[in-house]
């Protein structure tokens, strides 16, 4: 019941969409009725077109994001713990953080071509900095007394990093990863729209250019749903990992 | 009961002419410890007493090996201290529990580092959780515990690795008065059953006199050892804290500390 009530606005929006198109309030060219979009979606699902392109997109996003998390977390923690690393990388991170990473789309294509490689590189580069900053802020705030406790109980310097600094940095780092997750979808679809031969972004551009707008909207909705589902799943995971915080 | 035999007068920890400069991130370095010398006997309970800011915690951290000794030296069983180690367990004022670990997880941590077999670890963790009266709270996270329970966990965690020396940094300073009294008598009980060398930092004269065999009184910043007072009281006697001898001792030591506390106050008012 609660769940139903929660998603009521979404249902209202769907009804409004259908009615607006059916009653001619907006041109059906600009906004095909939702029912038609759903039909087109089912056709694409049956033909395998949707699944193949979604799989390719998710692989790119997943690989890029995984790299961004691994490298970004390592960099952030290294910057927080070793001053020379911070002196070297801090200014770079600060300068590159506000840069719109979509500007790198042509660059990554130039380096790695039209395939998966350029998308993965783009997502990796674009998503790394939020993770780095989260890990950096989290690790810098780790309590001196915790570090000393671990050391006095026999943890080595490196062991202490894993035992104390990483879990201390976790809450902020997980927030950074959530930002990165959203960014990954933005970059993925942008890159695929511009230069790709497969993927959901490519499909949107292709269907739009062909004038099959009901199918195009179907893919747009798919992307929206995937983004939402990924964020929801991530929040659940985050909640699990941070249960100790109360 | 014999607390330490006559032969144990050899010092276990020797602090010799230790100076320590505190370097704040901004501003000038401050001399925190000035020519501090101190000998700590094996299995004695020594209180480091002084006004806040006198460097007593700094001295404890130097003995712990958390800070480096730049001038002077600190010997442990004749060897200079080269860093932190499980031979010196520490209990902090604000508990310093791993918040992402349960009570059991916290107590198990040091045992894992010791490389004990799993069964032995579990058995020992449970024994020390029972010892500090936390049976039933093994799976609670620190955020679910009261201050007193957190400090019990921290004490269990440190005792479990069986350090020769117990360093305590105002361990009961963050607890309410009742819990503090309770914890003091429990600590004495635990210490009597398995005597360790304890260095206990506090600014509370009563606490120092109640717990310690000897009280080292420190001066206001820069910290020096002003004097070391032997406490000749039988702590096992009921109502010892209300006895005349106890109150006289507290008064005498308070007299020593008061001037320093006033100096520390003035230093804070006019920087």
Image (tube, grey):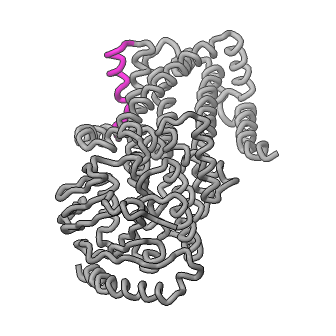
Image side of residue B40 versus residue A27, left or right: left
Residue A202 seen: yes
* x and y, in percent, of residue A11 in the image: 75, 39
* x and y, in percent, of residue A35 in the image: 75, 26
The one nearer the camera, A164 or B170, is: B170
Verify whether residue A30 appears in magenta. no
The one nearer the camera, A219 or B100, is: B100
Image side of residue A32 versus residue A242, left or right: right
Q: Tell me the quarter of the picture where residue A32 sits.
A: top right
Q: Does residue B168 lie above or below A91 as drawn?
A: below
Q: Does residue B213 lie above or below A215 as drawn?
A: below
What residue appears at the point 46 percent right and 76 percent down from the top-left corner? B207
* x and y, in percent, of residue B38 in the image: 27, 66
Verify whether residue A111 appears in magenta. yes
Q: Tell me the quarter of the picture where residue A225 sits.
A: top right
Residue range (magenta): A98-113
What residue appears at the point 43 percent right and 71 percent down from the top-left corner? B212
Image side of residue B128 versus residue A193, left or right: right
The one nearer the camera, A132 or A31, is: A132
Residue A190 seen: no
* x and y, in percent, of residue A85 in the image: 26, 38
């Amino acid at each position: 019941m609660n769940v139903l009530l929660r998603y009521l606005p979404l249902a209202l929006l769907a009804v409004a969409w259908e009615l607006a198109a059916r009653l001619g309030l907006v041109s059906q060219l600009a906004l095909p009725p939702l029912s038609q979009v759903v039909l087109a979606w089912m056709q694409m699902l049956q033909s395998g077109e949707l699944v193949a392109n979604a799989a390719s997109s998710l692989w790119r996003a997943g690989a890029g994001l995984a790299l961004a998390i691994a490298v970004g977390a390592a960099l952030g923690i290294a910057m927080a713990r070793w001053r020379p690393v911070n002196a070297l990388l801090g200014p770079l991170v600060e300068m590159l953080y506000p840069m719109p990473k979509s500007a790198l789309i042509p660059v990554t294509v130039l380096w790695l071509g039209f395939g998966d490689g350029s998308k993965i590189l783009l997502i990796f580069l674009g998503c790394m900095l939020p993770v780095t900053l989260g890990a950096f802020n989290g690790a810098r705030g780790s309590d001196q007394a915790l570090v000393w406790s671990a050391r006095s109980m026999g943890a080595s310097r490196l062991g202490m990093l894993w035992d104390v600094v990483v879990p201390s940095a976790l809450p902020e780092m997980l927030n950074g990863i959530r930002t990165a997750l959203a960014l990954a979808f933005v970059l993925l679809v942008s890159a695929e729209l511009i230069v790709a031969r497969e993927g959901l972004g490519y499909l949107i551009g292709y269907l739009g250019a062909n004038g099959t707008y009901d199918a195009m909207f179907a893919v747009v909705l798919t992307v929206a749903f995937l983004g939402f589902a990924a964020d929801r799943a991530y929040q659940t995971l985050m909640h699990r990992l941070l249960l100790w915080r109360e | 009961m014999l607390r330490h035999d006559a032969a144990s007068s050899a010092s276990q920890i020797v602090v010799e002419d230790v100076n320590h400069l505190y370097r704040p991130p901004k501003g000038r370095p401050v001399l925190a410890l000035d020519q501090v010398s101190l000998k700590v006997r094996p299995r004695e309970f020594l209180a480091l007493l002084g006004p806040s800011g006198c460097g007593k915690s700094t001295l404890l951290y130097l003995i712990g090996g958390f800070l480096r000794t730049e001038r002077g030296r600190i010997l442990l069983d004749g060897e200079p201290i080269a860093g932190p180690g499980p031979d010196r367990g520490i209990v902090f004022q604000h508990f310093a529990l791993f918040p992402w670990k349960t009570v059991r997880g916290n107590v198990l941590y040091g045992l894992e580092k010791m490389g004990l077999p799993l069964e032995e670890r579990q058995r020992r963790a449970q024994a020390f959780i029972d010892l500090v009266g936390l049976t039933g709270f093994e799976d609670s996270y620190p955020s679910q515990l009261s201050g007193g329970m957190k400090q019990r966990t921290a004490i269990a965690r440190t005792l479990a690795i069986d350090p020769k020396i117990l360093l305590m940094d105002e361990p009961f300073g963050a607890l309410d008065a009742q819990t503090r009294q309770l914890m003091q008598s429990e600590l004495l009980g635990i210490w009597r059953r398995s005597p360790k060398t304890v260095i206990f930092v506090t600014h509370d004269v009563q606490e120092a006199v109640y717990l310690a065999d000897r009280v080292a009184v420190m001066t206001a910043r820069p910290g020096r050892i002003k004097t070391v007072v032997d406490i000749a009281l039988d702590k096992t006697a009921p109502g010892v804290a209300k006895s005349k001898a106890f109150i006289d001792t507290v008064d005498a030591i308070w007299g020593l500390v008061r001037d320093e506390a006033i100096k520390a106050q003035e230093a804070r008012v006019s920087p």
